[in-house]
Image (cartoon, rainbow, N blue to C red):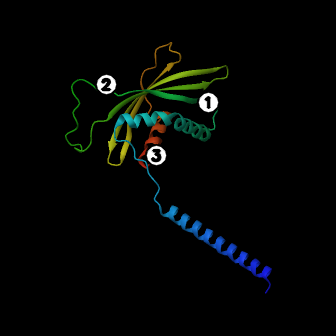
């Protein structure tokens, strides 16, 4: 065997060995990544931190709910989108005369709902011109063993910039924002919120 042939065989052997080693390293690396459990973020236990994350994501969640409901209804309606959510307040309102007392037959691990007030700014489009609405939301959040849930919600609608007084409160638990809050809380409970 000539010197050139010998060098060529050596180079080919080195190349094959290097390729095999790189493949083995890649295979081991992929297995290590596959066996590493995904990092879950936990839902905050205090209502202030929970609300700050909620209002950050609420416009995108609400707009997705709105798009899905428009597709399902297939009716031309007032097209609107949530631009921003903010101004959280946590001072509870009294729920009637006298202090709050729980039902004696209720589970003693259940705590009174936390009251949260947030505002959303929405832009709607009519046939003539775009309009902006300010919505005031009063959320009642309860903490269960597996995380936060929306108990009920009331909303009022006002003009933006402020003009006419807001509408009377209405139950909006099953509205676009109510469903968006429920979806976000569910994602938070299963660790999808960073």
> Residue 187: x, y in percent?
46, 46
Q: Nearer the viewer, mark 1 or mark 3?
A: 3
Is residue 45 visible to us here? yes
First of labels 2, 3 by sequence position: 2
Q: Quadrant of the N terminus?
A: bottom right
Q: Which residue is mark 2?
A: 93
Q: Secondary structure at mark 2?
A: loop
Q: Which residue is mark 3?
A: 187
Vertical relation: 63 (above or below) 2: above
| Circle 1 residues within 10 Å: few <14, some 14–19, many ≥20 | few
Q: Is residue 40 left or right of residue 142?
A: right
- In the image, 25 versus 37, the foreground residue is 25
Residue at left 53%, top 18%? 160
First of labels 1, 3 by sequence position: 1
> Residue 69: x, y in percent?
57, 38
- In the image, 188 versus 173, the foreground residue is 188
Q: Secondary structure at mark 3?
A: helix
Q: Which mark is residue 77?
A: 1
Residue 11, by quadrant, is bottom right
Mark 1–mark 2 Cα distance, whole angstroms, equals 35 Å
> Residue 190: x, y in percent?
43, 50
Q: Secondary structure at mark 1?
A: loop
Mark 1–mark 3 Cα distance, whole angstroms, equals 29 Å
| Circle 2 residues within 10 Å: few <14, some 14–19, many ≥20 | few
């Amino acid at each position: 065997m000539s010197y050139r042939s010998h060098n060529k065989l050596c180079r080919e052997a080195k190349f094959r060995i290097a390729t095999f080693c790189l493949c083995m390293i890649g295979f081991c690396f992929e297995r290590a990544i596959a066996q590493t459990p995904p990092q879950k973020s936990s839902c905050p236990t205090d209502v202030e931190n929970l609300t700050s994350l909620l209002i950050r994501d609420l416009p995108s969640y609400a707009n997705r709910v709105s798009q899905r409901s428009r597709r399902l209804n297939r009716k031309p309606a007032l097209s609107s989108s949530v631009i921003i959510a903010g101004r959280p307040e946590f001072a509870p309102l009294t729920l009637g005369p006298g202090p709050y007392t729980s039902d004696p037959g209720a589970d003693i691990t259940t705590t009174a709902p936390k009251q949260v007030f947030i505002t959303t700014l929405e832009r709607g489009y009519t046939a003539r011109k775009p309009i902006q609405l300010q919505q005031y939301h009063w959320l009642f959040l309860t903490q269960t063993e597996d995380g936060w849930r929306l108990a009920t919600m009331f909303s009022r609608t006002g003009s933006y910039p402020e003009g006419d007084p807001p509408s009377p409160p209405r139950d909006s638990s099953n509205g676009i924002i109510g469903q968006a809050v429920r979806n976000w809380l569910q994602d938070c409970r299963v660790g999808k919120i960073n």
